[in-house]
Image: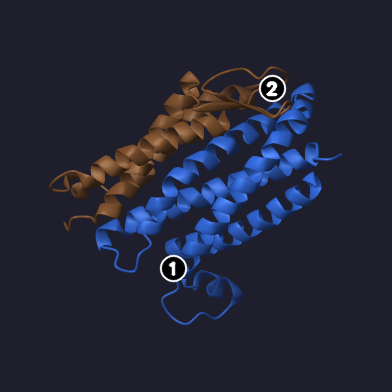
Chain colours: A blue, B brown
Amino acid sequence: MWIALVITHGLLAFLLLGAITHQVVSVWAPVRSGAGNFVARFRAVGSANYVNAVIVLYLVTAALGSVIYTNYRITARLTLEQGHFWKSFGAFELKEHLIAIGLAMLPAYWYFWRPSLEASDARTRRLLTTLIAFIVWWAFLAGHVANNIRGLGT
Amino acid sequence: MKTRSRFGVFAVTFAVVYSAVYYVALYNNWPLFSYGPAVAQWTLFNHSASDGPTMYWYGWIATSAIVGALAGLVACWLPGNPGGRMWSGLAWLVPLCSIAAIAHLLSGYFTR
């Protein structure tokens, strides 16, 4: 069961990673004219359409991760400690705190992505999106590395 | 500058207070509850599990979310909506500072 949960968690995280990366690229490098090549089309997505998906995916992925975390705490974490994988261990510790801080920003992230946003709040929207993207990328990579060192159920 | 809506005030206040309280709860180990995964044991506040490791992460989140939500509700229902003029950048700046402080707390793992 744990392996199925980890795989589902990873797939949801992958969807979240795609959605938030599209959004962060489009807020920092929006395409003004017609999108020609692949990179331009990547930048030209309608960022606002991703907001609800990002929030739902973040919450579901975090909830699933919090269930798996109980197993990690009594299995994989011991392997990381006993093997002295301190950087990976620290990266995973930081991941759990980043996810928790990300939860704090979700209501503001939703609010500042409303269509009726004031121009003065555009920077807030951009930086909230960037910070959430950083959290998602860190969480994905730290989780992936920890799973490579000691996968659940192995 | 246009005054922010009540939900906007709640959202910014929640981000600020939750992030700050999360760091304080982590630093002082003030979880609302604790969990022992080896024995599936939940206890109120900061108590070690009867066997195996104890997890406080859920409790720190609960502490921060409750305090953040209460602060947000108070801020958005204050007469005259003074929170409506609060700088929106606090919604990312305080979480960023909290992340930096937590990274500093954990820096020992990266320098071993």
Amino acid type of the residue tagged 1 in the rendering = Ala
Residue B99: x percent and y percent? 47, 35
Instruction: State the residue at coordinates (72%, 18%).
Output: B51
Is residue A46 placed above or below A125 in the rendered structure?
Answer: below
Q: Residue furthest left?
A: B80
Residue B24: x percent and y percent? 42, 25
Is residue B39 placed above or below A109 in the rendered structure?
Answer: above
Kindly state the secondary structure of the residue where label 2 is placed.
loop
Kindly state the secondary structure of the residue where label 1 is placed.
helix
Question: Which is more toward the observer, B7 or A115?
Answer: B7
Instruction: State the residue at coordinates (54%, 64%).
Output: A22
Dots 2 and 1 on the same chain: no
Query: What is the number of the mark on residue A48?
Result: 1
| In the image: residue A24, left or right of residue B80 | right
Instruction: State the residue at coordinates (54%, 42%).
Output: A99
Q: Is residue B93 visible?
A: no
Q: Chain of mark 2?
A: B
| In the image: residue B75, left or right of residue B49 | left
Mark 1 surroundings: few (<14), some (14-19) or many (≥20) residues within 10 A: some
Residue underneath mark 2: B53
Q: Chain of mark 1?
A: A
Residue B1: x percent and y percent? 16, 56
